[in-house]
Image (tube, coloured by chain):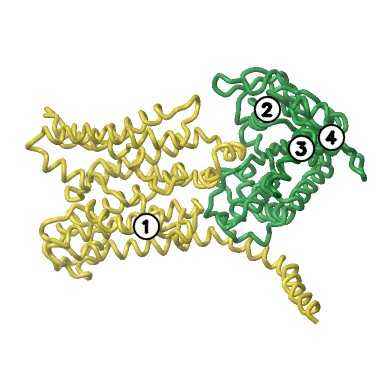
Amino acid sequence: MAKMEMQNVTLTYGQRSVVRELSLHIYPGELLGLVGPNGCGKTSIIKALSHVLIPDAGRILLDGQELGAISRTELARLIGVVPQNPSLPDTFTVFEVAILGRNPHLGLLSGETARDMAVVWQAMEKTGITHLAKRRIGELSGGEKQRVTIARVLAQEPQVILMDEPTANLDIFQQMDILDLITGMCREKNTAGLIAIHDLNIAAQYCTRIIMLKNGQIRAEGMPKEVVTAENVREVFGADTTVYPHPENNLPMVLPNTGCRHSGNGNKEKHTNKVH
Amino acid sequence: MKNLESDKKLDIPAKENSEGEAANMAREFATYSSRRLLLIVSICGLLAACVIIALLALTVGSVGIPFKTVWQVLISHLPFVHAQANWSAVTDMIITGIRLPRILLAGAVGTALGTAGATYQGLFRNPLADPYLIGVAQGAALGAVLGFIVPWTFGGSYLIPVMAFIGAVAAVSVVYLIARVGKTAPVTTLILAGVAIGALLMSVTSYFTMISADKVRSILSWMMGNLSYAGWDQLGIITPYIVVGLAVIFLFARPLNVMQLDEDQAEQLGINVERTKIILLGAATLITAAAVCFVGTIGFVGIIVPHIVRLIWGPDHRLLLPLSAIMGAILLILADTASRTLMAPSEIPVGVITAFIGAPFFLFLLRRTKKAVF
């Protein structure tokens, strides 16, 4: 099973370096959470790990082999990516998009076999979109499109799965559904998973390990309990919060301290004024 | 009671769903696997239609020739066939020397423009893309106009298509180089650069056209699209280019499907996006230049043909590309037949006809807001 590794990687867009000398590992069977404020380099890391963005310095290894030494097609068989806001062709049907995931497994001239289609259908069953098979992408909601992309990636049968905010358009039930699916996959198929995610509570509940980033560098790394603390959240996000253990599983929960930020008196006066 | 009723209502579709699941899957697989069959059947059907239209087109013109005679003349030219000629040599000449090469050339040009249009639209993920969007036609036009006005000491008119070809390839190369950002040429900058270079080339072309007073007429006739100089020679020259270009493009049908996602996703699905882009851009430019060099700029075929095919057969490029090729041939043979018969014995430039029919159709597509066409 594949393990991914970044060694002292620096990534730049034009003149601006977004990630500086960053090292991380993704192990088979784990779901690594990548959290941090907007612009901290989460998306760039995912692009670099999928060999779309080439590092200026440092090495990225897949099972000890540098990404540049592996062919595009081979990479696509090993690494599946759920990008942030992926664009999908509106006139394609859901099935037509999902089956694009089989592309790295097909030769230039060969068509899809029955097995290819069965894999695609299974991926669609897992993401709960089989009833949409014939629908065109243009008719779907944001959440449904998100599921189509995830099904497309599952159809790739990757050994490493990288996700950039895969639950951004989903409601709480759908978020849990997708994350249950992904954590299940990581555990059962021993897939190495990386998820960039905004929601600290979701990250703490589902990720086996969390890396907290600020300005392209790692500020905290470890088990959810070690990383998601009030001090770290204040330091990295500049937000004043209280962190409680979840009553059932003791995993950390982040709650905003609204009362402390807007000092009580002024607000109360305004409020009473409005009532008058 | 109310509760029971609503329970029933909820229950029934749920049951249907679980039972329908397997059937649903089987149906989806069947339709998807039958796509190859659909392709073969559609190709055969369209090819048959194309041949029939071409045969009918052979009968009409300034001299009407009965269908039976057309058949007999064509068959008499097949190898090992010795038919008793009961028609005049002039009739034979009109059919095999004038009309047949012209119809075949119209077919070849239509094939090239239709396929190139579908390729550019897929490549740029833009329903408005056509061979003229990235400067191909404008480059070819400038090359051809220079060919017209330079007093050649040798070669003469045969150098004009060569000049058109060079112009087209040069224009696209410049557009591609300008649009490059780092190692890639993003689609939007490619289109913007194409539009700007196209406009620049057009202004240069207009200037040269204006100062070449005595040749304005022949230049304008070329720019409006004209198949009246068609002959076997021209057909022989452009066919190899078109055959090679089509073969390359058809080979890349599935990668083109994957590239309908964005470029990052295509890359993450194993497509070498930049290489695929250059190969397809090169092949589509090759066949466009081949189409444009003898017959001039024929607008709207490249835009409309892929849209018609997409409306009927859907957006899968494995169907779209080959069917656009045949549909392009059919459309241009029809348009050229109209161009030489509507005002016989004088001709309406075929570009005028395609634009006259194409523009309203294009507007109709634009207004079909209920269902996205692309």
Chain under disc 3 = A
Count the marks.
4
Q: Which residue is mark 3?
A: A193
Query: Element type at marker 2?
Result: loop
Chain under disc 1 = B
Q: Estimate the spatial distance between the alpha carbons at disc 4 and disc 3, rounded to whole Å.
A: 28 Å
Instruction: Say above or below: A117 vs A52.
Output: below
Task: Locate residue B258, reporting x and y percent.
Answer: 55, 45
Amino acid type, mark 3: Gly
Q: Which chain is green?
A: A
Q: Chain B appears what colour? A: yellow
A86 on left or right of B167? right
Query: Element type at marker 3?
Result: strand
Amino acid type, mark 2: Cys
Q: Estimate the spatial distance between the alpha carbons at disc 3 and disc 1, rounded to whole Å.
A: 47 Å
Write the residue at 36% across / 54% down.
B304
Mark 1 or 2, which is nearer the eye? 2
Quadrant in which residue B296 is drawn: top left
Q: Earlier in the sequence, mark 4 or mark 3?
A: 3
The answer to whether residue B103 is seen in the rendering is yes
Task: Locate residue A153, reporting x and y percent.
Answer: 67, 45
